[in-house]
Image (cartoon, grey):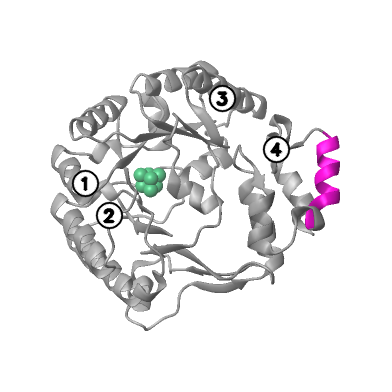
Amino acid sequence: MLLYVHIPFCKRKCRYCSFVSYEKSESQAERYIENVLKEAKNRKNEFIEPIDTLFIGGGTPSLLSPGLLLYFTDSLFRILEADKPTEFSIESNPGTVTEEWMSAAVKAGMNRLSLGMQALQPKLLNTLGRIHTFADVKTAIRTARRYGVSNINIDLIFGIPGQTHDQWTETLEASLSLHPEHISAYGLIPEEGTPLYEDLQSGTLILPDPDLERKMYDSALSILRMHGYSQYEISNFAVDGKECRHNIGYWKQVPYVGLGVAAASMTIIQQGDHGMICRRKKNPDQLREYEEMVFGQRDPAEDLVVNPAETRFETMMLGLRMNEGVDEELFRKMHGITIENVYGKKLHRLEMQGLLTHSGHYWKLTRRGFDIQNSILVELMDD
Ligand code: SF4
């Protein structure tokens, strides 16, 4: 199973950010960590399988002091009586990574570092409201390598207001010069309520047009492929064997427990002959409400049972994100029915239209299918 821990603190809120994160004081962070450990104790019985991957995300986990990070991970493994997971990722903001923090993270068991570089050019970093420079990314990677971290991800964003195609390819080249094992390239999605969204609404900023954004994505596919990175999901690329196990777990509906503010969890109630039924929970977004939940004074923000038709659709939605596609055999094992029985007619029609391919026991999107995946999913929605 997968374990996610959310650390909802950032030095300063980025202008495009809609994640749950707050500017923190040290005492707030200590109190929060105690609450997460209490939540882990409360939910220990949900850890029915060994923890394969741990992902500490945020927010900015690299803002936790080295001492607090070590205290947290040691206590967490002790409470859960868990061994160090196979893959243990920590997200970090390059502007906050120090030598001491890296040393503590490696001591804690981190074997995969995820760095938010986003862009090369200071002007674009400024548009996004990032607090770091490319020099900080280089320093963070050098430090990580010195401490023996052999699996590093760099997050990049394309489609930033004012970004040219050349600036995007320069960003890709700059990140490749750092030899990360993994690169994530996300198209910017302006979220309502963020300062960036307001600037777009008022016309102060303008997004690149959709053709340019598509060209940027295509360039990412070809440049990364040329440098030995295989695409394994819409936005994710890795050298051989360095695909993110944790995220693949989400896309394959492996059960997960999320601890902390706004964290989501999924357990499987049943699967097989009578269909797959899941339970999905989400913790409150606010620190105070989260604390009240941990102390039994409030329920999770969301707690629902997902029925077989919905879990089948999720298998399609998540599986089609991945380059390998949806595995028919796995589908049958999980849902107790063949994919042909449920989606056969629609899949064959989409195949005829050149939007899906069927090879071996996998259904996957074609390049053209990738571009209109939302409408494909809408078509599959009513099985
Ligand atoms: S560092 Fe990440 S979580 Fe924090 S404000 Fe920026 S985008 Fe949001």
Q: Is mark 4 within 8 Å of ligand 1?
A: no
Which element carries disc 1, helix, strand or loop? helix
Closer to viewer: mark 4 or mark 3: 4
Say if the magenta span includes residue 347: yes
Which comes before the other along the chain, label 4 or label 3? 3
Q: Which residues are magenta?
A: 342-353
Q: Which disc, if any, is residue 359?
A: none
Horizontal side, residue 194 vs residue 286: left or right: right
Evaluate whether residue 262 shows in this view: no
Give the residue displayed 13% in from the left and 42% down from the top.
100
Provide residue 295's location: percent of width, then percent of height: 32, 80
Residue with the mark numbered 2: 84
Of 164 and 325, the residue lying toward us: 325
| Amino acid of disc 3 | Leu
Residue at the image point whose x is 41% and y is 36% from the top: 242
Residue 221's tag is 3
Q: Amino acid at mark 2?
A: Lys
Marks 3 and 1, how far apart in space?
Answer: 32 Å
| Earlier sequence position, callout 3 versus callout 2 | 2
Prevalent SS, magenta region: helix
Lower position in the chain sequence, tag 1 or tag 2: 2
In this rendering, the label closer to the viewer, 2 or 4: 2
Neighbour class for label 4 at 10 Å: few (<14), some, many (≥20)? Answer: many
Helix, strand, or loop for circle 4?
strand
Q: Residue 177, image x and y in percent? A: 35, 18
Where does label 4 land, which residue? 365
**Residue under numbered circle 1:** 105
Height in image: 2 above or below 308? Answer: above
**Sequence-wise first label, 4 or 1:** 1
Q: Are marks 2 and 4 in contact (CB under 8 Å)?
A: no
Query: What is the crowding at mark 2: few (fewer than 14 residues within 10 Å), some, or many (at least 20)?
Result: some
